[in-house]
């Protein structure tokens, strides 16, 4: 089963952050990504932020498999 990932490089960001958050549970990935956005990118917790991050969740692509 493909894991879900949020790649910070896909997000509008001024920090050139390259973090990738992955897991099998989409809600957990979103939760951690929201916390990361708040802690490291200075975002404010909001429904809009969560929706934007949720929209960026994608299936992990195996690298070098
Ligand atoms: Zn980031």
Image: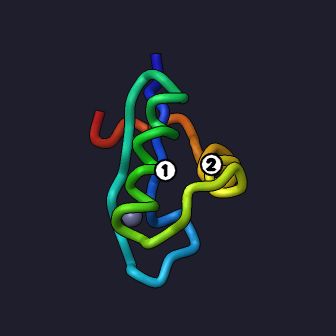
Residue 23: percent from left, percent from top = 39, 29
As drawn, 48 above or below 31: below
Task: Name the one closer to the observer, 18 or 27.
Answer: 27
Direction from residue 64 to residue 42 in the image, left or right: right
Q: Which residue is mark 2?
A: 50
Residue at 46% x, 66% y is: 9
Q: Which mark is residue 34?
A: 1
Direction bottom: furthest residue: 14
Task: Name the one closer to the observer, 57 or 32.
Answer: 32
Q: Quadrant of ligand 1?
A: bottom left
Q: Are marks 2 and 1 in contact (CB under 8 Å)?
A: yes
**Quadrant into which the C terminus falls:** top left
Residue 59: percent from left, percent from top = 53, 35
Residue at 58% x, 43% y is: 57
Secondary structure, mark 2, is helix
Task: Name the one closer to the observer, 63 or 35.
Answer: 35
């Amino acid at each position: 089963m493909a894991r879900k990932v949020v790649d910070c490089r896909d997000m509008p960001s001024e920090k050139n952050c390259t973090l990738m958050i992955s897991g099998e549970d989409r809600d957990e990935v979103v939760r951690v990504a929201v916390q990361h956005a708040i802690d490291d990118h200075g975002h404010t917790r909001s429904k809009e932020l969560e929706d934007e991050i949720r929209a960026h969740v994608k299936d992990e692509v195996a690298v070098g498999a």
